[in-house]
Image (cartoon, rainbow, N blue to C red):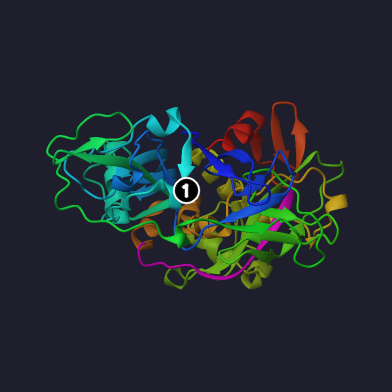
């Protein structure tokens, strides 16, 4: 679902329509760019309503989840794109999901003018995720199998409120004007709008030199054109990220795709070097002595892809990392067509055990130990890899990994 939200520009007040995934607001009127930062928790939106007495409204929360779900079972690694809204307060009469309504009408951010009171979110995230996964048949046909590990990667979490209007001891859906069966407003309690629910704005300027940081709405990391530093959106603002580039082969590459290069150890599986990784996953090549001292690096796409392509790409690059040459510092003028970063490091971290499971030639020695094998991350960097143009595909210069152009384009809409 591509949900749209109306957002006033913090600089001039002009109305801007964004995707709910956008984190960079570019005003079409004053041209000022600002990052959107959440104030401790998911962003909050509400469906439009025509209620005249907004102070009488109750707002029921729905948890919206969008992302890739990966499950490791006896059969291997399964995956699915999941996009759903689930009731978060358990009020009698409420529909289990908002259905297509968030797509059919523009959302607005919750603000002081929304009026009324907001019912508390009383659900448990794990239970809601498990319910949504079951409803979408992710584990269909494997009911008797053990789920060794489950990960939600590239996820977008937000609250979408359904406005309710009390009338004659009954609650009405303030969007459709229909009564909710079995509902009552007598015992309802909620809280008023909280100022910390509103997003904060951060000017898209380089913290070091003050230069403009240019990018598209869904970009989560931007390169300063003046000092070649990479800045990603953090919880408190812009955070500097180590940016590196691996030079291309004999010809000049047409595109550089970003990857999170994560150095990590998994003590429970005795993996601390690339040689350990190759041995535990039974890779079909001879292990070189120098790999014993080479740190284990997981290579995770820093951009969204369909789950099967995401996993295949991460697996191939991680296994083939021995073919890379030395890295050099990020230089925007020498980096050809750098692709936007749309997957944050926090999400990439959650994929390490899934990549490990997918890389295993035989899962028997890996799968059963995943639940207790926590990855100890040491360092991370954003590394741009060169890709050559092959008509319908992009091919990585060193490893031969191929990503379809249409697949890359579709990933921007996930």
Query: In the rendering, at what x and y percent does residue 73 appear?
Result: 33, 49
Query: In the rendering, at what x and y percent does residue 248 appear?
Result: 81, 48
Left or right: 102, with 61 as reference point: right
Left or right: 283, with 119 as reference point: right
- Local SS, label 1: strand
Majority secondary structure of the magenta segment? strand
Q: Nearer the viewer, residue 291 or 316?
A: 316
- Which residue does the image show at 27% across and 52% down from the upper left? 127
Q: Which residue is mark 1?
A: 156
Residue 380 drawn in magenta: yes
- State the extent of the magenta-drawn residues as a range: 371-385
Residue 378 drawn in magenta: yes
Total labels: the figure holds 1
Q: Nearer the viewer, residue 241 or 234?
A: 234
Left or right: 101, with 285 as reference point: left
Q: Nearer the viewer, residue 66 or 74?
A: 66
Query: In the rendering, at what x and y percent does residue 87 appear?
Result: 28, 44
Q: Nearer the viewer, residue 155 or 63?
A: 63
Is the residue marked by circle 1 packed among few (<14), some (14-19), or many (20+) residues within 10 Å? some
Left or right: 16, with 335 as reference point: left
Query: In the rendering, at what x and y percent does residue 372 appear?
Result: 36, 67
């Amino acid at each position: 679902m591509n949900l749209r939200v109306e957002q006033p520009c913090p600089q001039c007040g002009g109305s801007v329509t964004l995707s709910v995934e956008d984190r960079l607001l570019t005003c079409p009127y004053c041209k000022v760019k600002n990052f959107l930062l959440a104030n401790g928790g998911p962003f909050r939106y509400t469906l439009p309503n025509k209620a005249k007495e907004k102070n009488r409204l109750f707002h029921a929360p729905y948890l919206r989840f969008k992302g890739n779900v990966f499950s490791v079972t006896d059969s291997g690694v399964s995956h699915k794109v999941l996009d759903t809204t689930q009731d978060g307060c358990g009020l009698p009469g409420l529909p289990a999901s908002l259905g297509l309504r968030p797509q059919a009408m523009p959302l607005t951010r919750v603000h002081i003018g929304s009026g009324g009171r907001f019912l508390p979110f009383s659900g448990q995230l794990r239970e809601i995720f498990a319910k949504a996964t079951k409803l979408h048949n992710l584990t269909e046909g494997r009911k008797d199998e053990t789920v060794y590990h489950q990960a939600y990667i590239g996820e977008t979490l937000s609250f979408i409120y359904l406005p309710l209007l009390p009338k004659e001891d009954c609650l009405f859906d303030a969007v459709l004007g229909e009564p909710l069966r079995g509902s009552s407003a007598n015992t309802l309690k909620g809280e008023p709008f909280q100022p910390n629910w509103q997003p904060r704005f951060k000017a898209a300027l380089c913290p070091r030199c003050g230069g403009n940081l240019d990018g598209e709405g869904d970009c989560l990391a931007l390169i300063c054109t003046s000092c070649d530093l990479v800045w990603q959106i953090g919880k408190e603002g812009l955070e500097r990220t180590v940016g590196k580039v691996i030079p291309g082969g004999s010809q000049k590459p047409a595109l550089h795709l970003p990857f999170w290069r994560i150095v990590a150890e998994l003590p429970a599986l005795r993996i601390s070097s690339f040689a350990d990784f190759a041995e535990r996953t039974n890779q079909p090549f001879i292990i070189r002595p120098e790999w014993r001292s080479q740190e284990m690096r997981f290579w995770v796409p820093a951009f969204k892809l369909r789950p099967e392509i995401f996993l295949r790409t991460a697996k191939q690059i991680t296994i083939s990392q021995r073919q890379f040459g030395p890295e050099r510092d990020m230089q925007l003028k020498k980096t050809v067509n750098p692709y936007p970063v749309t997957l944050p490091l926090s999400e990439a971290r959650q994929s390490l055990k899934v990549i490990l499971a997918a890389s295993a030639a035989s899962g028997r020695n890996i799968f059963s130990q995943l639940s207790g094998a926590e990855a100890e991350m040491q360092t991370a960097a954003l590394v741009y890899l060169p890709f050559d143009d092959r008509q319908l595909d992009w091919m990585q210069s060193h490893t031969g990994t191929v990503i379809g152009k249409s697949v890359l384009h579709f990933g921007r809409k996930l």
